[in-house]
Amino acid sequence: MGLDAAGLVEIATAVSVARPDALAHPPAARTAAATATAASSRSEILRCVFTFAPFVASVLRRWTAGGRPWFPRPVSPATVHAVEHGSVRIGAIGVEVLCQGWAPLPLGEELPGLDVDWAAERALRPWAFGDGETWQWHVHAFVLRSPSATVMVDSGLGPFDPGAPWAESRPADDVLASPAVELDAVRHVILTHLHTDHAGGAMRDGEPRFPNARYHVHPADWAHFETRDGRGESAARYAMRRLVDLDMLSLEADDGEIAPGVAVLHSPGHTPGHRSVLVTDGDDHLLLTGDLLHLPAQVAHPDWRSSHDLDADLACRSRETLLTRAREGSWTVGVSHFARPFGLVHPAGWRSRP
Ligand SMILES: [Zn+2]
Ligand SMILES: [Zn+2]
């Protein structure tokens, strides 16, 4: 059974009630009272221990299994609430993950031409994999809250088809319009690239989902995804054409700060205008990769060519460059599609934050 916060309060209350004499009697009367009631107190405490032993065991089981002990573990497949991933702080900038859900994708289609020992990879990082020969493809956006601005990095899949059945999902409006993210307060929306799983939530019913924001897209992606009908991969770009009429779209090509401490870095290959985002406050850094990475195995092997990358060789070079900087600078890294989105680049590979 699950144990929630109310359950913990109940335990704390019960434990205090199990020692009423210690709390109720003044010091002078305590010795005599303790002698008279020692036997009944001991039996009360024993009864309490036996009563709550199953709860404690349940908490310990969840803890050792890697779950959050005070919430029921998510039930899969097809629950409606996506995984909670927590947050990090980079100096004064808070960073939260907005997870729309995950779908199991076939491993065999990921790294064409490579003979990968997936059993060994699974043994190293079991959390990254689904049932059978699949991995957990999560869909993440990030919200950055600094004293000067609220910034979205990507916008989730929105209403578009994930391309594979969700194992676990949550509607776009629940993720992006939750009370945790006040849409009116978002000043910048940085889209790492224009695939629908990153830019699909940018608009809602033909209008900007973030009405007071400036949207930032690399011009090479804006050009690459342009079509007349907006089908397939260009669906998000097509929906965003309204931003031009509203003068809410920035197509600046250069790297640099979008808001204080939030800079874009051109990292092409996955798409022509693909960008990663570097969040900095003092000596603290966070690299939000966009689709520089799909699988944790690519951290130890940045030269593994991914089927998702339009120009796979260029993508490998971008990956190598930024992962080297992240490793040398001990940057925290946030990944769009990892089941554990935050971690570090270690010489032996991805080291996720628990
Ligand atoms: Zn997730
Ligand atoms: Zn992509």
Image (spheres, rainbow, N blue to C red):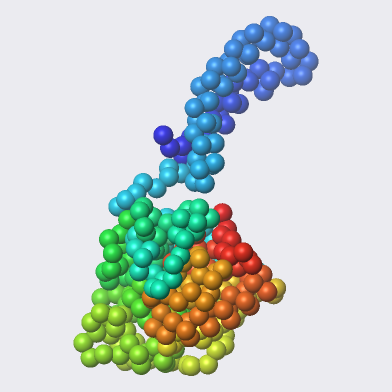
- Where is residue 103, by image quadrant? bottom left
Give the x, y percent position of residue 133. 36, 57
* Residue at 51% in and 70% down: 298
Above or below, comparing residue 43 to residue 228 in the picture: above
Residue 176 visible in the shown view: no
Q: Is residue 88 above or below residue 192?
A: above
- Total of numbered circles in the picture? 0
228 relative to 277 in the view: left or right: left
Q: Residue at x 28, y 68 (%)?
A: 163
Quadrant (top left, top right, bottom left, bottom right) of the N terminus: top left
Q: Is residue 304 above or below residue 240?
A: above
Residue at 49% over, 59% down: 121
Out of 287 and 252, give the one closest to the viewer.
287
Q: Position of residue 246 (x, y in %)?
A: 34, 89
Residue 293 in view: yes
Q: Look at 37% across and 59% down and name the residue there.
A: 134
User: On screen, 188 above or below 69?
Assistant: below
Is residue 303 or residue 33 the one in the foreground? 303
If the image is split into quadrants, where does the C terminus sit?
bottom right
- Looking at the image, the residue that sits furthest to the left is 229
Q: Nearer the viewer, residue 228 or 251?
A: 228
Picture quadrant of ligand 1: bottom left
Q: Position of residue 297 (x, y in %)?
A: 51, 66
Query: Closest to the observer: 333 or 159?
Result: 333
Position of residue 345 measured from the top left corner of the image (x, y, whole percent): 60, 68
Q: Is residue 12 left or right of residue 217?
A: right
Instruction: Farthest residue to the top: give it.
Output: 36
